[in-house]
Image: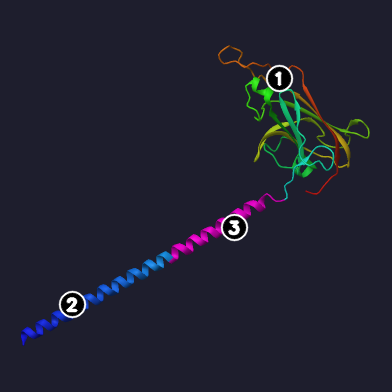
Amino acid sequence: MKKNITTLLGVLLAGSMAFSLAACGNSTASNGSTTASNTTSSSAAASDNSSSSDAGASDAGAGFEEVPVGPSGTAEEQDQEAGPLTVGAVYFQPIDMEPASMGLKAADASFHLEADIHGNEQAVDLGYGKGDFIPDLTVNYTIIDKSTGKEVEGGKATSGTFMQMNASDGPHYGANVKLDKAGTYQLKLSIESPAAKGWMLHVDPETGVKGHFWTEPIEVTFDNWDYAPRQW
């Protein structure tokens, strides 16, 4: 009798252990499935957030427009080659700069006028790479009213010296300008070499450059600029 009871207890114990192991296995499988589901959901959410972020970044640039200085309907910026320089001119919405004490405030300006000046093939002889921004130039500008042939009257900062500055698309020369009158204008640039600010060149046989800086200002003119005040 004792032997039968002992055998019965053994059978019951074995069955109980088998049930527990099976339950544990099912629980592990269930947890694994839940974890995988959560991971998939998290990945999808991250993807959605990334897409929203990209869309937001794209929307952030909406409304910004560079307008070439030149005749209306000009399809693209009309760069000019002048000596070792490639020079372009555009204008767009007035912008705030720092230090804030330099230049016209955006709130007081009609637009931001920009000169993009880079080296061309001739600039390689001066130690620049083709397409490199040329720093430390003195860039004097004047806006002339074509109807009178004289410098604009009644505006603010319609002539002067561009400041060099950095924007999200790189360095350039520019200034905020106040110009309320629609009309046809001419933009004249007078560009002094970096030597005017003490920029030096190597001239020894081993490390020197082949060229020399220009000694007279380079003059560049953007003519027949059809301008009309606009709401940016």
Q: Name the amino acid type tagged 2.
A: Ala
Instruction: Check residue 14 in the rendering and tell me which mark sits there, or answer none.
Output: 2
- Between residues 229 and 160, which one lies in front from this camera angle? 229
Q: Which mark is residue 196?
A: 1
Q: Residue at x 39, y 68 (%)?
A: 33
Q: Nearer the viewer, residue 187 or 76?
A: 76
- Check the image and name the residue furthest to the right: 148
Q: Which residues are magenta?
A: 37-62
Between disc 2 and disc 1, whose residue precedes?
2
In this rendering, the answer to whether 154 lies above or below 193 is below
Q: In x, y percent, where is residue 175?
A: 75, 35
**What residue is pinned by disc 3?**
52
Q: Which mark is residue 78?
A: none
User: Which amino acid, by three-letter code, is at mark 3?
Assistant: Ser
Observer-side mark, 3 or 1, equals 3
Name the quadrant containing residue 168: top right
Query: For the residues carrying marks 3 and 2, which lies nearer the camera in this image?
Result: 2
Instruction: Please check the rendered image and state whether residue 31 is part of the magenta-colored stretch, yes or no.
Output: no
Q: Main secondary structure of the magenta part?
A: helix
In the image, is residue 15 above or below residue 169?
below
Mark earlier in primary sequence (3, 2): 2
| Residue 109 visible in the displayed image | no
* Residue 195 against residue 46 in the figure, above or below: above
Which amino acid is tagged 1?
Ala
